[in-house]
Image: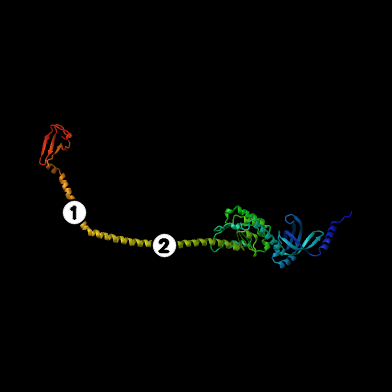
Amino acid sequence: METHSLYDLNNYISQAIALNFQEAIWVRCEISQVGKSRGHYYLDLIEKEEGSDELIAKAKANLWKGTYAMLKKKNGLSIDSVLDAGMEVLIQVVVRFHEQYGLSLQIEDVDPSYTMGKLEAERRAKLEQLIKEDLHDKNQAIDLPVVLQRIAVISSERAAGYKDFVQHLSSNVYGYDFQMTLFDTRVQGIAAEKDLVKVLKNIKKRKKEFDCVVIIRGGGAKTDLALFDGLELCRTIAKMPLPVLTGIGHEIDDTLSDVVAHTSVKTPTAAADFLVQHNMEFESNILYMMQEIRTYSNHRISEEQMQLDSAVQLIEMTTANILEREMDSLERVEALLPEISLQIIEQKKAFIEKMEAMKNLLDPMEILKRGYSISYKKGKLITASSQLKAGDEILTHFHEGKATSTINKIRNGKN
């Protein structure tokens, strides 16, 4: 039986690879992990079965420091954005097989436009899915509170954008006070999407503590912001019970997070400006309403004063007319008073004379003159025979003189 040493086998594989891959080739793959040491990049490349997460191929690739410097000069910052875990890339590699270290791919070139195209295609597909699920404008249907004061801020605490946001909000010219609660998390790299989703769900549980949520991140290339196109992140933002504001420093195109958010602005500083402006508009409305109330009050006071002046004038005129009529009446009464007084005096005089005549008629002495007498028993007037008994002594008054008599017999009745 023929046998071969491992070295011989690997040497044979090395020659076969060298013979069949004499030139660099372009390879489509996904970066699963990135390591960096002394300026060199060490990448784990994978390929998944289309439509699933099943791994069907895996390899390691190296990007040497010198090649990286050349590519960075050629492509600018976009090369850094492409070399990130989760990115689909098109890379030009030289295939090498070493008897001791095995197969390796040496990266010679990277095509950022391929990654951009893949990202854009995925972005369009995700947007269509969000629209299909009626999530693209769900968060926008939430009414903003009239005052935004309790702010849940999602950012990296070390990020310059966060510091700009805090400084800008704290030093606003109107002196508005904001209560900011930072939820520190990564906002860089595809893997950060899960962290953002976790933070948003935490804020959702504490929704009564906040007026809104602000997601901020500084500027960067499109690939740096690819995590904000994540479907799960966008779904979470859309379903938040609080209005979500995004202040992500990015290029002209918006991320899907911007699309589903309640309000999106271009930078963290712009997000702070939006909050200040929103509260300023509320204050302006209050001041405007105060001015309207003041104007309306002054107008009403003026109207009421005019009506009052008219009423005073009317009262004065009416009073003068009444006084004039009463004076006329008094003058007429004054003119008639002597005649009326004489009439009254004559009437009273006739009445007095009549009373005098009646008085005279009722005077006891006058009655006695007409033959009547008055009898008393022991000083008491006798008006009935029942007051007397036989033997009683009575005193009788006549018109002239008195007489004392003794009762012998009493007859009751009128006869």
Q: Which of the numbered marks, if any, corresponds to residue 316?
A: none
Above or below, 167 relative to 350:
below
Quarter the C terminus occupies: top left
Disc on the earlier residue, 2 or 1: 2
Q: Residue furthest right?
A: 1
Question: Which residue occupies the foreground of this view, 233 or 218?
Answer: 233
Q: Quadrant of residue 50?
A: bottom right
Q: Few, some or many C-alpha atoms within 10 Å of disc 2 (few <14, some 14-19, many ≥20)? A: few
Q: Nearer the viewer, residue 99 or 45?
A: 45
Mark whose residue sits in front, 2 or 1: 1
At a point 29% along the width and 60% down the height, the residue shown is 325
Q: Is residue 235 left or right of residue 106?
A: left
Residue at (17% x, 49% y) in the render: 354
Secondary element under disc 1, as helix, strand or loop, is helix
Choose between 360 and 381: the one closer to the eye: 360
Q: CA distance from mark 2 to mark 1?
A: 61 Å
**Place of residue 260 in the rendered image (x, y in percent of width and height, measured from the top left):** 63, 58
Q: How many marks?
A: 2
Horizontal and vertical percent position of residue 299? 44, 63
Crowd rating for badge 1 (residues with CA inside 10 Å; few <14, some 14–19, many 20+): few
Q: Examine the image and state in which quarter residue 176 appears.
A: bottom right
Q: What kind of element bears circle 2?
A: helix
- Return the x and y of residue 163 as percentages of the image width and height: 61, 62
Residue 303, numbered label: 2
Residue 334's x, y, as percent?
23, 59
Label 2 is placed on what type of residue?
A: Glu
Residue extending furthest toward the front:
415
Residue that badge 1 annotates? 346
Q: How is the image coloured?
A: rainbow
Residue drawn at x 11%, y 36% is 404
Label 1 amino acid? Glu
